[in-house]
Image (spheres, rainbow, N blue to C red):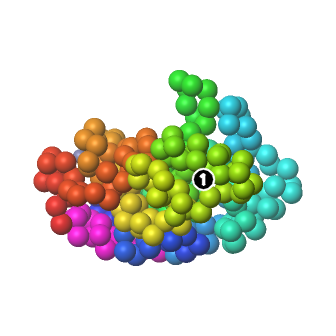
């Protein structure tokens, strides 16, 4: 791989330039950072593709609502991503749509593009017949979802119980500090200050996949591990050491 281009997500706490610096210390390829992908390449066909990629029902594989109003909404969301909340998009369809926006000379396999997105993306689970939110979607481009970091890996069981209990007593959600102090096991919440640090490994997973063909690492303490639960995300991405011995060999800074 010769070049990796990352795309910023300014409406999120993810500091993509810092992720780029971290990556640059660990791989041979040239790392570049550009502005938001959707701001650079957003046009009507892309808005239509997002409309078509909307998950309408978590248990229905069929996606898409290309009614004119929805397409217009998606057009505005390309410019103003704050509007795009609450929707899950089919990650593979978004990946194809963003790929189509790349210029022919930048579509090569030696140039990986990694748009960091402020959208929630998911993939369909054939084994259980429902959509699963994802932190990343590997391939070209490699998608990274910032809200996916908070929402895709499950929080500790106690978190949901505590939230429910608090809602019954006071009618609202408990403050984050309360949740953090009462629940065993670590987890990331929306706009978590550890966002940038946690995303580094997910970006490297996209690089690793395109350059080696390997997906995730089985070692739970490795940045290339795909944890299904939040405490696992903290162990893989934020605790030391960064990598398992095999991947430390390859990605030592
Ligand atoms: Zn590893």
The vertical placement of 226 against 35, above or below, is above
Residue drawn at (60%, 53%), measured in percent from left and top?
120
Locate residue 194, reporting x and y percent: 41, 66
State which quadrant residue 207 falls in. bottom left
Locate residue 180, reporting x and y percent: 48, 58
Which residues lie in the magenta part?
20-34
| Residue 23 is inside the magenta segment | yes
Q: Quadrant of the N terminus?
A: bottom left
In front of the other: 131 or 238: 238
From this viewpoint, is residue 53 visible? no
Q: Quadrant of the C terminus?
A: bottom left
Residue drawn at (39%, 60%), measured in percent from left and top?
198
Residue at the front extreme, as displayed: 169
Locate residue 4, reporting x and y percent: 36, 64
From this viewpoint, is residue 216 visible? yes
Q: How many marks?
A: 1
The vertical placement of 147 against 215, above or below, is below
Locate residue 148, reporting x and y percent: 53, 53
State which quadrant residue 82 falls in. bottom right
State which quadrant residue 101 falls in. bottom right
Q: Is residue 248 left or right of residue 228?
A: left
Residue at the top extreme, as displayed: 127
- Mark 1 — residue? 120
Residue drawn at (73%, 37%), measured in percent from left and top?
57
Residue drawn at (72%, 56%), measured in percent from left and top?
170
In front of the other: 154 or 210: 154
Q: Is mark 1 within 8 Å of ligand 1?
A: no
Tag 1: Cα neighbours inside 10 Å, few (<14), some, or many (≥20)? many
| Residue 231 is inside the magenta segment | no
Q: Secondary structure at mark 1?
A: strand
């Amino acid at each position: 791989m010769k070049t990796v281009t990352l795309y910023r997500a300014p409406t999120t706490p993810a500091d993509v330039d810092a992720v780029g610096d971290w990556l640059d210390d660990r791989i041979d390829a040239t790392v570049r950072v550009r502005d938001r992908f959707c701001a650079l390449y957003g046009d009507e066909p892309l808005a239509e593709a997002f409309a078509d990629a909307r998950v309408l029902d978590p248990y229905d594989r069929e996606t898409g609502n290309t009614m004119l109003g929805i397409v217009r909404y998606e057009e505005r969301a390309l410019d103003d991503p704050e509007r795009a909340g609450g929707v899950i998009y089919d990650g593979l369809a978004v990946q194809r749509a963003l790929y189509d926006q790349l210029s022919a000379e930048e579509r090569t396999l030696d140039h990986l593009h990694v748009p960091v997105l402020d959208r929630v993306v998911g993939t369909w689970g054939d084994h259980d017949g429902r959509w699963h939110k994802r932190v990343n979607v590997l391939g070209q481009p490699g998608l990274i979802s910032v809200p996916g970091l908070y929402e895709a890996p499950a929080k500790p069981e106690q978190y949901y119980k505590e939230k429910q209990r608090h809602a019954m007593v006071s009618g609202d959600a408990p403050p984050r500090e309360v949740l953090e102090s009462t629940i065993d096991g670590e987890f990331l919440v929306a706009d978590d200050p550890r966002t940038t640090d946690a995303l580094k490994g997910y970006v490297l997973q996209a690089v690793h996949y395109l350059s080696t063909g390997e997906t995730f690492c089985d070692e739970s303490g490795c940045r290339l591990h795909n944890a299904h639960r939040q405490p696992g995300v903290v162990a893989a991405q934020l605790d030391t050491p960064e990598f398992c011995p095999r991947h430390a060999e390859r990605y030592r800074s």
